[in-house]
Amino acid sequence: MDTTAGQEEPWWKRGIIYHCYVRSFMDGNGDGIGDLPGLISRLDALRDGTPRSLGVDGLWLSPIYPSPNHDFGYDISDYRAIDPAYGTLHDFDLLVAGTSQRGIHVIMDLVVNHSSSEHQWFRLARTSRSSPFHDYYLWHPGKNGKPPNNWGSTFGGSAWEWNEQTHEFYLHSFLKEQPDLNWRNPRVRQEVHDIMRFWMDRGVDGFRLDVANYYVKDALLRDNPHEFIIAQPMPGNPSKTLVLPMLREVPRYTVDQPETHVALREMRHVLDEKSGRMMVGEVTQRSLDQVLSYYGGGIDELNLVFNFFFFVRRFRAQNFRTVIQQTLELLSAGAWPAWVLSNHDVVRAVSRYHLSPAMTKSMLGLLLTIKGTPFLYYGEEMGLPNTRIPRRFLQDPVGKKYWPLPVGRDGERTPMLWESSPGGGFTTGTPWLPINTSAAPPYSAQSADPASVLNFTRRLSWFRSHHPALSAGDMSFVDSPSDACLCFKRTSPAECLTITINLCQRATALLPDRSYSTQTPLFSTENDPYPDHLAPWEVRIASSASMNG
């Protein structure tokens, strides 16, 4: 096997990227909050060069900048520093050194649709209309003492907040403590470019762009239309339905403005000043075409775009196949898909789909074998579910505001379960969110269990890294043994693999007149795969004829 073929592709195409919510990963000083020294102490779990680790190629850090934490880091008060709760710039440099030594690339969360209201820019901007920073933000005197239009905040209420010092309203797409930056101002764009260069000069290899399609707003501040709905997917849990008749705002003039694509192309130019860098964007979804448009021509805007349509409503083969097939068909030439099933804003997939360990393996098997870059959310590699948080322990402003509606995000942000001790091996102090030590077998126990979800993920990651068809090859669906199965081929110049995944609790017969029935299994969730059928929830990878003959 020629394993060098996949190495020709950039790291962000061929590798697995690990999403680390730093606050909950590992506490290094006992204060109950995850930090950079704690993360450094656990780097070998992510990649140590052997099959005993996950073997990830990228490490996306949730925001670690100074922040008043009204939205837990997504309200940044200084873009060129580290919040003391997480450590220092020296600690960050040690992290970069440790990751580089292991072949891991660091990705910073770049939150530049808005800043914190405590950022020096805004503190000066709000003092006077003549402040040189005033037009870093979006202002309007209003109409008859009311906001200038009907734009609403994503977190509820008006998106406009009154500023008494200048007798104006300022725009905030999220919390009032998160004022929106004015992306039509060339000075703001230059500030963002300089921030990117600052972190790239410190060894950062990529950026995750928060709400990347929000950047530019309608210049005329026109009212958004509304639509009447009776039901919608539950915020944060698309597998459930929220039945609540209402007029819902359609963000025609607040997101997806044409000028946002111009801004992203400028950022791409900055990024490409150094080789091997990448950007992945969070884009709120309206349609698949709209989401994929942020690749630009495939090579001039975002390198990767999260495809949240992959958060399918039901854990069924056809649901996944439809999204995957449509995505691959609609992608621009040169564009590369990105796949994610859990993150810090969405109920973990294990809990959304009520997955058993066997089902979790099939889910991870799908995520790590389809064409594209897979993103693993911390704990997902071991089947960590959401934790139910009592009201008195809620931290998330969304969860507090809308309680008892289950829309808060604390449950998917609870600390990593390293051990079964009271602090879960995460901290020697009181954790910032409660830890359910019985939610899943802890990391230590799963490490010692060959049949665990963790060891399955490690084994598949290692297999993937040694097979260029999986890490960089093309993909095509083929006829599957049943409607409950997914069957597809991954091909590269060096090899052709057939992946068959049984998303069903029943065994599925392999049809004797199909190619997969005569292929040699190279990998399976089963120790001894049956020659004539798939076990329930089995993931099987088989070898086809070499592409070189």
Image (spheres, grey):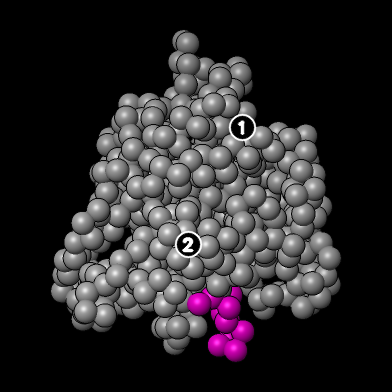
Decide: few, some or many residues near mark 1? Use Cα within 10 Å; few <14, some 14-19, many ≥20: many
Q: Please report whichever mark, 1 or 2, sits nearer to the chain's N-terminal start.
A: 2
**Marker disc for residue 465:** 1
Magenta region: 387-397
> Is residue 483 found inside the magenta-colored segment of the image?
no
Q: Foreground residue, 235 or 96?
A: 96
Decide: few, some or many residues near mark 2? Use Cα within 10 Å; few <14, some 14-19, many ≥20: many
Question: In the image, residue 282 lies at what x, y percent?
Answer: 43, 51
What's the residue type where badge 2 is placed? Ala
Q: CA distance from mark 1 to mark 2?
A: 50 Å
Q: Foreground residue, 200 or 294?
A: 200
Question: In the image, residue 332 lies at what x, y percent?
Answer: 31, 31
Residue occupying the point 81% across, 52% down = 41
Q: Main secondary structure of the magenta part?
A: loop
Position of 415 with respect to 497 (left or right) is right
Rendered position, 345 above or below 16: below
Rendered position, 134 above or below 530: below
Task: Report helix, strand or loop for mark 2.
Answer: helix
Q: Which residue is mark 2?
A: 125
Q: Quadrant of residue 140?
A: bottom left
> Is residue 396 found inside the magenta-colored segment of the image?
yes
Rendered position, 218 above or below 487: below
Q: Is residue 220 visible?
A: yes
